[in-house]
Image (cartoon, rainbow, N blue to C red):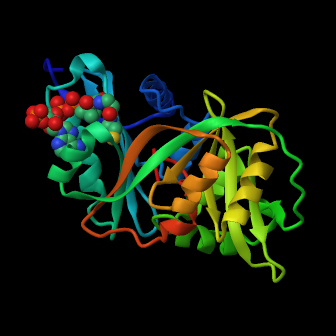
Amino acid sequence: MASNEFQIVVASSDQVKWIMKMVEDEGWNPGCKDPITFQLSDPLGIFVGLLNGEVIGCVAGVQYEDFGFGGLFIMMKKYRGKGYGMKLFLHALNRLRKCPKIGLDAVLEQVSNYQNAGFQTFHHTMRYIGIVSKLDFPCNHIVDAKSVSFDKLLQYDRCHSPGLRKCFLAAWINLGTDRSLVYLDDNQNIQGFGAIRKANDGYKIGPLYAESFQIAESLIHALAGTFDKCKLALDVPIPNKSAVKLAEKLQLKGEFETVRMCYTQPFTYDWNTVYGLTCLELG
Ligand SMILES: CC(C)(COP(=O)(O)OP(=O)(O)OC[C@H]1O[C@@H](n2cnc3c(N)ncnc32)[C@H](O)[C@@H]1OP(=O)(O)O)[C@@H](O)C(=O)NCCC(=O)NCCS
């Protein structure tokens, strides 16, 4: 092999584990079962960059039914600034070009780079973190998400997220999370949906969708109450004032700001009913 040969290949399971270690080292606190969920969502959508056969960086360009999402964009420190990251990024973006919509979640330092690449801000997002004590919050409207029609849940998820993502959602509720709950009204219509998963540090709640503040509050207590003294993280779209109010009521602290960005077409979901994004890595 010629020296300095740079190749981009679909990541194997072992390489996905390497990627999750990189995610952890960046301080992004991945969910413990994220690797399997990510691979099931689009097995051809996660890539590593190899320099002379050695893995040095990674990126994801995951195709869902009607949108694509980029993430997991990391280069080993000693190889940064040499043009390899841009090659990885363009590889992922080129794969997604045929998707009607494309998004990503950017750390603040990368926003201007993504703007140069054609992305525009959709909304800023704040990761709120804190301990939510177990509260007795009985609510007979809340049931296991796996007990309702998957098609109904899929349509509900579609209206509150970048788009339709059947395999992802199935993997998310069945494998990737520890508990997923929906809030049903008296007519059995879904009025809220949330899931919690163990992360490297504490737990992450995502998504958390709700048609009202009270529903969001009931769901977050029901999810957090699964674990005692639950340290949790919630990625809140900052323009949703009701969601910020809920985070503040729970005394969570805003610790990590990112920007959800879209390529050419903006997403259409109404962030006023989104109290927590599903996951910054893949949408
Ligand atoms: C972001 C990261 C992967 C870039 O990797 P890299 O190998 O250092 O990037 P490159 O060497 O290819 O960058 C070359 C040039 O392309 C630009 N560039 C890099 N990625 C780009 C992108 N996605 N879009 C537009 N421009 C980009 C760089 O700013 C740089 O421009 P400059 O020469 O004017 O400074 C790397 O800095 C990293 O791992 N950062 C920490 C993790 C992180 O923040 N990831 C992004 C999360 S949103």
Give the quarter of the figure containing the N terminus: top left
Q: Where ligand 1 lies, by image quadrant?
A: top left
The answer to whether 150 is drawn above or below residue 217 in the figure is below
**Of residues 144 and 171, the one drawn nearer to the viewer in this rendering:** 144
Horizontal relation, residue 66 to residue 234: left or right: left
Percent x, y for residue 17?
Answer: 51, 28
Residue 46's x, y, as percent? 40, 43
Q: Quadrant of residue 273?
A: bottom right
Q: Where is residue 267? Give x, y as percent.
A: 39, 68
Can residue 74 be seen here? The reply is: no
Q: Is residue 257 above or below residue 272?
A: above
Residue drawn at 62 percent across, 72 percent down: 156
Q: How many marks?
A: 0
Q: Residue at 19%, 44% (x, y): give it.
A: 113
What is the residue that sits farthest to the bottom in this orientation?
Answer: 187
Provide residue 6's location: percent of width, then percent of height: 20, 29
The residue depicted at 50 percent of the width and 61 percent of the height is 240
Q: Nearer the viewer, residue 179 or 170?
A: 179
Q: Answer with the quarter of the image where residue 138 lies.
A: bottom right
Q: Is residue 236 visible?
A: yes
For the point 55% across and 41% down, the residue is 128
